[in-house]
Image: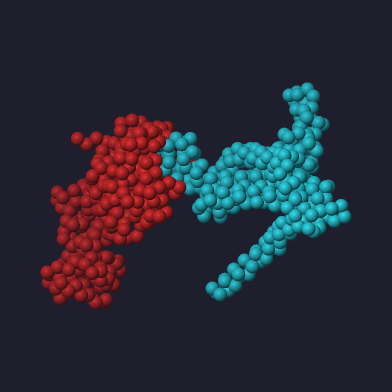
Amino acid sequence: MKHYDNGLKHFSLSIIWLWLTVFAMLPFCLVTLASFASHDDAHLLTLPATLINYIHLNNSVYVKIFKQSFYIAGICTLICLLLGYPFAYLIARMQSRFKGLLILLIIIPFWTSSLIRTYSMITMLKPQGVINSMLLWLGVISKPLTLLFTDTSVMIGLVYNLLPFMVLPLLTNIERLDNRLIDAARDLGANRLTTFRKIILPLTMPGILSGSILVFLPAMTIFYIPDLLGGSKSILLGNLIQNQFLIAQNWPLGSAISVVFTLLLAVLLIIYWRSSGNKDSQELL
Amino acid sequence: MTTNIIELHDVSKSIHDHVILHDLNLEVRNGEFLTLLGPSGCGKTTLLRLISGFENPTTGKIFINGKNVDGLPPHKRHVHTVFQSYALFPHMTVFENVAFGLRCRKLPKAEIATRVAEVLKIVKLEKFAQRKPDQLSGGQQQRVAVARAVVNRPLVLLLDEPLSSLDYRLRKTMQIELKQLQRKLGITFIFVTHDQEEALSMSDRVVVMHEGGIEQVGTPRQVYEQPQNLTVANFIGEANIFDSEILSIEGKQLGVNILGKPRNAKSSRSFELGQKVHILVRPEDLRVWKQVDVDDSKDMLPGTVEEVIYKGTTVDLMVRLSNNQIVAATEFFDEDDDKLEYAIGEPVFATWVPGWEVVLPHETL
């Protein structure tokens, strides 16, 4: 039996390793190689090897896009956290039989392509769209608001798409939170605020961090949301990479941006692991 | 002078029309070690949660230190709980756990440090102050839980089956430690347990609970030797029960008839002639004689040995009496009886010293 278990374990582990090697490691190596290649009108990639792509990156336009992307993704993460935490907390602590249904409602959007849902956001946000018609009909506004193709619409799109990634890890974390610890804190004289600050918040920190990482990373790179909802005005990192590959046909530069971006994220992840240090938070990720 | 630190007046608790506690009246004296004893599901934990403020009574009033605490949330009541699972904060060190209550009260840092150090010394954990709870053994965690509560000098310390997750040996040690701690601190302890031995050995008074009600309140000796009813008698210790009716009454002396043998019994309760009663005899009061040792078997109950269990300090016997009823007897080694050798199937006589039995009014079970 033990032998069989070990065999199964090794088999599943090798599948995972094979998968990661072929579909994650190998492409990343190719991109890294491409980032050191030259480029001319006749070839997408060509020799000689060069560092020129990285040198080009040290350009105020690109630096600005990097900063802008970090800023937008940061704000998006913060909004998701502020919306998602109370939401996850309420559902996790709920005794009602509707709890399962509510969790299902969070997951249902995953059944439709995020691209299609983003298109449908346009019908919601456009001047004659659902939101404006509603507000006009209610008499709150007298002429349609400009919602579409603004930074706001990009943010709405990002938050809408990424909120479940914040809620789900938080939900798991808060559900595992031992009720008796909250009772104990109250018993020892802590009011609700202190209980939240000293007990609930530290104990759900792993969920907050994993949720934030799961929102922050895609927020920087989902290129179609700024594309569709931000019009041509909003250029974020994901769009920049997409442009270099598909429009400017500059694969080496696109690769260099990807490599720098990946390294930055790796640094962030390492900081996260270092700071959390305990096994629980790593398991959640 | 003893005053009541906690008083319960007609307290009932129902959840979704399901009655959990009904019409409880209880007075807890200041400084005593009171045990709530009862089988699981008898409502003892709910009673504790009513006192700590996590639940509110459906009807009735609770007074803590003379004050009606109706609607007062747990953090505003000066009683603290040691939870069954300890509920130590896993992200805090032992020191921070113990300091938690004091920090909530915003005491000066220096005072917190002294008081925490003081209480950690009492529970012998001063060397472990910087450890996290998961680096401690079960017994140490238990002591942290106690320290975390008593450091706040509560009026009453509530302990919800605090020893149930410890192994037998450690539980014995902790029973003694808790009892000593209670004497040292002089704080009123309300201790919940389903272990009757624990209740008897630790408490000043025992509250026997059954199905949401209080059956008897008394000292360990009272509840063991003078149980109010069959429920108490059966729950605390073992009891052999014989049915009879009262044949004669002379003061406290009652004439009864047990399996056809006339016997005398003693009780301070009043009974009527002809009243049906239960006669209770504890196994340790039942003496079992070999046939050769008996001259006069006039008021002895004949039977055969069904089972012999050697226990080191005692020999436990199961004896089948003439009416097929099986009784338990615990025989002690002493000068008269240093062998206590019984064979299974051996005919014997069982008897007890008149007056050592308990006479209770008949109950239909």
Residue under the point 78% across and 29% down: A146
Q: Residue B239 appears in which quarter of the rendering?
A: bottom left
Q: Is residue B116 visible?
A: yes
Q: Position of residue A246 (x, y in %)?
A: 82, 49
Quadrant the N terminus of chain A occupies: bottom right
Visual hue assigned to chain A: cyan
Q: Position of residue B11 (x, y in %)?
A: 37, 38
Q: Is residue B84 visible?
A: no
Compared with A175, A78 (above or below) is: above
Residue A216 lies left or right of residue B350; in this view the side is: right
Residue under the point 32% across and 51% down: B127
Residue A16 lies left or right of residue B333; in this view the side is: right
Residue B288 lies left or right of residue A18; in this view the side is: left
Q: Position of residue A113 (x, y in %)?
A: 76, 49
- Decide which of A221, B48 is in the foreground and name it: A221
- Decide which of B137, B352 is in the foreground and name it: B137
Q: Residue B315 appears in which quarter of the rendering?
A: bottom left
Residue under the point 18% across and 62% down: B352
Residue under the point 50% across and 53% down: A278
Count the marks: how many?
Answer: 0
- Decide which of B82, A193 is in the foreground and name it: A193
Image colouring: by chain
Compared with B25, B273 (above or below) is: below
Q: Residue furthest right?
A: A42
| Chain with red colouring | B
Q: Residue B26 appears in which quarter of the rendering?
A: top left
Q: Position of residue B23 (x, y in %)?
A: 37, 39
- Decide which of B43, A195 is in the foreground and name it: A195
